[in-house]
Amino acid sequence: MASPCRIRLAGVADEAQAQALAQAAVDEVRRIEQRYSRYRSDSIVSRINAAAGSGRPVPVDAETAHLLDFADLLYRQSEGRFDLSSGVLRQAWDFKAARVPSETELARCRECIGWDRVVWTGEAIALPRAGMEIDFGGIGKEYAVDRAATLLLEAGVRSGLINLGGDLRVLGPHPDGRPWRLGVAHPRAPGAVALEWAVHDGALATSGDYERYFEQDGRRYCHILDPRTGWPVSHWQSVTVAAPSCLAAGALSTLAMLAGPQAPAFLQSQGVAYAALDPRGELVAPGLEPST
Amino acid sequence: MAATEDRKTASGWGLIALAACALPGVMPATAQAEEAPEQGVVALKYSSYEDHQPGLKRLSVKSPSAYLMTPIGREWSVEGSVTHDDVSGASPRYYTDVTGASRMHDDRKAGDLRLTRYFERSTLSVGASHSDEHDYVSNALSLAGTVASEDHNTTWNWGVGAAHDRINPVNDLVDNETRRTTEWLLGITQALTPQDIVQANLTLTRGRGYFSDPYKLFDARPRQRNATIALVRWNHWWSDLGMATKLSYRFYDDSFGIRSHTLELAADKHLSDTLVLTPSLRYYTQRAASFYYDPVSDPNVYPAPYGTPTYSSTDQRMSAFGALGLGLKLAWQFEPDWTLDVKGEQYEQRSNWRLGGHGSPGVDPLTATQWQLGLARRF
């Protein structure tokens, strides 16, 4: 998952049993990582991408079909802001070299973006153009959090926390009923906490402009890119969403970053609680009371 | 630095959150056990009802009421309400004619209590209610439950109830009369898509005892009344419009010979984050009871029914008519846990608005206006 991951279980009486449960959860996370990694040539994603432009639809299993259906819904609900085929933009954006791509480079990438051009039948998928690719980067990790949580909850675990690189799901409060107090990283002060959130159950996910970025001529270029233009978003410093599942929280926090100033109305329409840091670093968190 | 509490909105998730949770394996089946509501509600309402017929203000009812629902732990909830109706005015003795003697004033006090236990995928509740007027006392008990499918897309609901009423009219026409009613209900609710929910209910009722109106002339009704009621509903969420529409159709058929159809359409439109406007439109049409008889055309006589029939009635509610209701409700969530709502409804009933046949002749139209003001707090 290319990020620090942690599984904490509480209220499991026997240590060996806790180890076995945690191992099963880790195995499930690894299974999903392998299945949806674009770095592994045997993954379903690599097989789909390898067939791009061939006109040959690639049949997919039921689990992948559900995720593609969900990505399709996100595309339609976000008016194209979430696009499973937008990963090719990383060919133009080099955050290590801190280089702003030319409009020609972006235009070339945009020719390979467009979920609306992908042929998705519900059972098989075909990418119409050579060079097109799909990437589960926007939802795969969050899905892995939920799958690991479900596995543990169905095994009877009622207290604990799964944290895959900051996307997390609470299995239930501490055994004494206290909520988990979760800190959200400050986007402008590394190591500092911007806010704390007390969570009994459900999931939290954060999207921000500070994970991969560079600054040039006073402008910040972050890794969250709008597939319609190819340019980075530039409104919120970070958005944290609480939802029943990590998949929902992650998708909604990413869509909120992409929605710019419309994010509060969008998140409210989705019925979720959220906390966002605006361009000046001010906390926008309706209904949540600040304290020191 | 800010500390926050996770806010639980058990209902009201948007389409994306619901779709994410609906993916297989994202939420555990066992964690979807039916749980008691996480928040309690206390609500106060004041409603005012007035009906009119041409040239005459008839009944007026003012009703303050209070409602409380509170969870008890994670597996139980209890809810109850009390109402006081202050009824005054004139009810017609004969068709829509009112005599001086039919002026009335009444106080009705009513209350009910319901206890619900939540199990994994099912609920069971028991309820009791009591209503008291000076000439009419009613007590009822009910048992109801729901069972949800493993994926929670289908819910069966069932209920049985029994009511016992005691009638002691002030005119001493009858003394200590009773009426017993039993009711059975079976229904199914199905989530078709994340935006569509349909529901179908079938209710059978069986009543035995005194059904006549002791304050009306020539009113003698059968001592049994059995009814079949079918209801179908369809709720659809239009994500593009930020609006939910609720369409329902109700069919009613009883052993008095009344058969009615009700079609209702309502919409919840979010005007802003805190304001919801709900317009509604209802059309109702019914066939007359078999023992209802039409007035004769000569207004100078007060005719009894022809011959000496076993059963007869001149009650406007037993006639054939159609009716339209138009309502508007505005709910304002002025604080996260506080909601204020105001609702108005205008209703009009006319013989010639009956669909598929003539309405009963010679009956005055009836109009009614209802206002309601409510304040609710979640805790």
Image: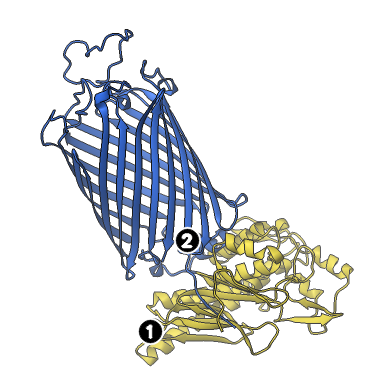
Chain colours: A yellow, B blue
Q: Tell me whether the residue at label 2 lies in contact with that at label 1, contact meaning CB atoms closer than 8 angstroms.
A: no
- Kindly give the residue lying farthest to the left in the view shown: B175
Residue A282, x across and y down, in percent: 67, 76
User: The disc numbered 1 marks a residue on which chain?
Assistant: A
Q: How many marks?
A: 2
Q: Which residue does the image show at 12% across and 30% down from the upper left?
A: B174
**Residue B86 location, quadrant:** top left
Q: Which residue is label 1 attached to?
A: A175
Task: Decide: few, some or many residues near mark 2? Use Cα within 10 Å; few <14, some 14-19, many ≥20.
Answer: some
Which amino acid, mark 1?
A: Pro
Q: Quadrant of the N terminus of chain B?
A: bottom right
**Residue A72 location, quadrant:** bottom right
- Is residue A165 in sight in this rendering? no
Q: Which residue does the image show at 73% across and 64% down from the upper left?
A: A52
Q: Nearer the viewer, residue B167 or A102?
A: B167
Q: Any mark on residue B338, and which?
A: 2
- Is residue A11 in sight in this rendering? yes
Look at discs 2 and 1 and give the one toward the viewer: 2
Residue B195, x across and y down, in percent: 53, 52
Q: Quadrant of the C terminus of chain B?
A: bottom left
Residue B17, x across and y down, in percent: 54, 63
Which amino acid, mark 2?
A: Trp
Describe the element under mark 1 as helix, strand or loop.
loop
Q: Nearer the viewer, residue B366 or B229?
A: B366
